Image: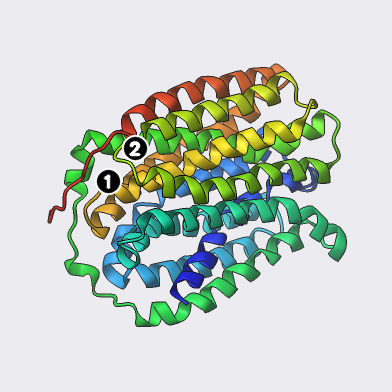
Amino acid sequence: MLVAGFALAALNLRPAIAGVSPLLGEIMTDVGLSPAGGGAITTVMVVCLGVFGPLTPLLARRIGLDRTLLAGLLVIAAGVTLRGTDGAPVLYLGSALAATAIAVMNVSMPAIVKQHFPTRVNLMTGVYVSCVVAGAALSSALVVPVEHATGFTWRGVSALLAVPALLAALLWLPQALRGRGDGQNAPRPFRTVVRSRVTWYVTALMGLQSLTFYVMLAWLPTIYQEAGLPADQAGYLLSLTNLVQVGTSLAVPVLAGRRATQVSYVVGAGVLTALGYLGVLLAPMTVPWLWMIVLGVGQGASFALALLIIALRPADPAAVTALSAVAQSVGYVVAALGPLLFGFLRQVSGGWTTPLVTGLGVLALQILAGWFAGRPATLGKANL
């Protein structure tokens, strides 16, 4: 039950975001948004992933990690239901509410791995990350077919995303009821974490790989639709790259976690992501499935390795929560610039060459950050 609830909760960490991009054209037309305004939907959500992550240590100390996770699932359900009602303000508000819950859950999950599976960190990190990317893949693949099958508009499809969140909450409820909320006396290692260079290497890696990921999550279907593919086929390409990430993110943490250093894995993942970007830039309609596979392997490995390093470096769950809060909060604020910047560059340049070349520059910085973040180090336990 613990593993099943943990996995199902992880499945809910991306559909609220990934389910937007295949329907983005319809949403923009219905609500009356510009390309920059359409990109801002994802940007708002990713900003919330960064800004509200620091709430997690406060909630975890007051009500416990397990109950914090349960609360996050319920708020996701509320947010995706709200944004499908009416008007641009409500669209952004509901998206922000769902993303705030995801932010709290993002920070909680590595600490839950450390708390409940201390001898299986590598394996359970792989399970966690593979479920996250599986949720993204399923949502990006199914939102358009579900819309066609049900006759719903994008608003109804958005509300349907509340169903898996509520199911996960129901499954996690017994664990939350057993969990203790007496975390007030838990160690508070923020000062030690913030002062460590390791923290900022990991934060840079987390932010840059998230930026390059969310750019593709937000704009890849649009890129291919403008190249001539129907909306459903463009969504399938995004789904393919996300599906590839499932297997990659399950295997890579198990392999990389056995070694003292993860440098070769992190650098290799960045290079593969860059090759995927190049394929989309230079020959998007030539074997597009191949570019999606390469991109998926690179992005899946990058994400999994960033979260594995967050779980491995600290000595205890409280330090994991602190490092996770810093790395994911700052990292996602950086990542939030990506979709908005790509939308702006597309708008002013009239094409996708300038945005994709900019993405390649960001990937060069990601590889450099990974070189330093992947080296062995330990953040010690501190009661500050």
Q: Is residue 198 visible?
A: yes
Q: Which residue lies at the image location 30% right of the left edge and 62% below the top edge?
A: 118
In the picture, the disc for residue 127 is none
Against 346, residue 222 (above or below) is: below
Q: Which residue lies at the image location 54% right of the left edge and 53% below the top edge?
A: 130
Q: Is residue 66 left or right of residue 288?
A: left
Tell me whether circle 2 and circle 1 mark residues in contact (CB < 8 Å).
yes
Q: Which is nearer the eye, 247 or 79? A: 247
Three-letter code for the amino acid on which mark 2 is drawn: Val
State the separation of the CA atoms marked 2 and 1: 10 Å
Badge 2 element: helix
Quadrant of the rendered image containing residue 119: bottom left
Q: Is residue 45 left or right of residue 380?
A: right
Q: Is residue 34 visible?
A: no
In the picture, the disc for residue 313 is 1
Against 315, residue 212 (above or below) is: above
Chain-order first, disc 2 or disc 1: 2
Q: Residues within 10 Å of mark 2 (few under 14, many from 20)?
A: many
Q: Is residue 192 left or right of residue 38?
A: left
Q: Which is nearer the eye, 23 or 272? A: 272
Q: Which residue is mark 2?
A: 202
Q: Position of residue 235 (x, y in %)?
A: 76, 45
Q: Position of residue 231 (x, y in %)?
A: 82, 43
Q: Which is nearer the eye, 362 or 153? A: 362
Q: Is residue 295 left or right of residue 308?
A: right
Badge 1 element: loop
Three-letter code for the amino acid on which mark 1 is drawn: Arg
Quadrant of the rendered image containing residue 263: top left
Q: Which residue lies at the image location 48% right of the left edge and 42% below the top edge?
A: 303
Q: Residues within 10 Å of mark 1 (few under 14, many from 20)?
A: many
Q: Position of residue 135 (x, y in %)?
A: 61, 56
Q: Position of residue 63 (x, y in %)?
A: 32, 72
